[in-house]
Amino acid sequence: MPKLIVNLPAIQCYVKGEYLHNLEKDFDNYYDCFWVTAKAVHGRAFLIESMVLDYGALYDKLPLSAYTWKRPTPSGLFANVGLFVL
């Protein structure tokens, strides 16, 4: 049971698709969302409840790692990867 539930201002961000499907599929998609509440459970990090606009649903208790402020660009995904041929 949450010990603390706090309403948040409408903060727009993106949620990673894999967190909406139990980390099994939809790895490359990001969905628009708004934070609704933050919940604190004893001994755990904050969990966020968010409204996903594409699905029109509230997703409860997603970790902070499920969110990002901007979508990654395709050129930035492998910018730091170097290929070495022996």
Image (tube, rainbow, N blue to C red):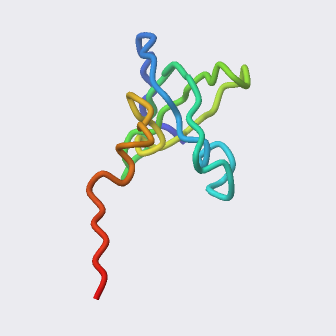
The location of residue 58, given as percent across then percent down, is 66, 26
Taking 39 as reference, is 26 left or right? Answer: right
The quarter holding residue 57 reads: top right
User: Which residue reaches farthest front?
Assistant: 86
In the rendered image, which quarter contains the C terminus?
bottom left
Residue lying at 36% horizontally and 53% vertically, measured from the top left: 43
Q: How many marks?
A: 0
Residue 64 versus residue 54 in the image, above or below: below
Give 19 or 62, whichever is nearer the viewer: 19
In the rendered image, which quarter contains the N terminus?
top right
Taking 80 as reference, is 74 left or right? Answer: right
Residue 80 versus residue 72 in the image, above or below: below
Give 33 or 26, whichever is nearer the viewer: 26
Residue lying at 41% horizontally and 37% vertically, measured from the top left: 73
User: Which residue reaches farthest bottom?
Assistant: 86
The location of residue 63, given as percent across then percent down, is 46, 44
Give 3 or 9, whichever is nearer the viewer: 9
Residue lying at 60% horizontally and 22% vertically, measured from the top left: 51
Give 23 or 38, whichever is nearer the viewer: 23
The location of residue 15, given as percent across then percent down, is 53, 34
The quarter holding residue 39 reads: top left
The location of residue 59, given as percent across then percent down, is 63, 32
Residue lying at 45% horizontally and 24% vertically, measured from the top left: 13
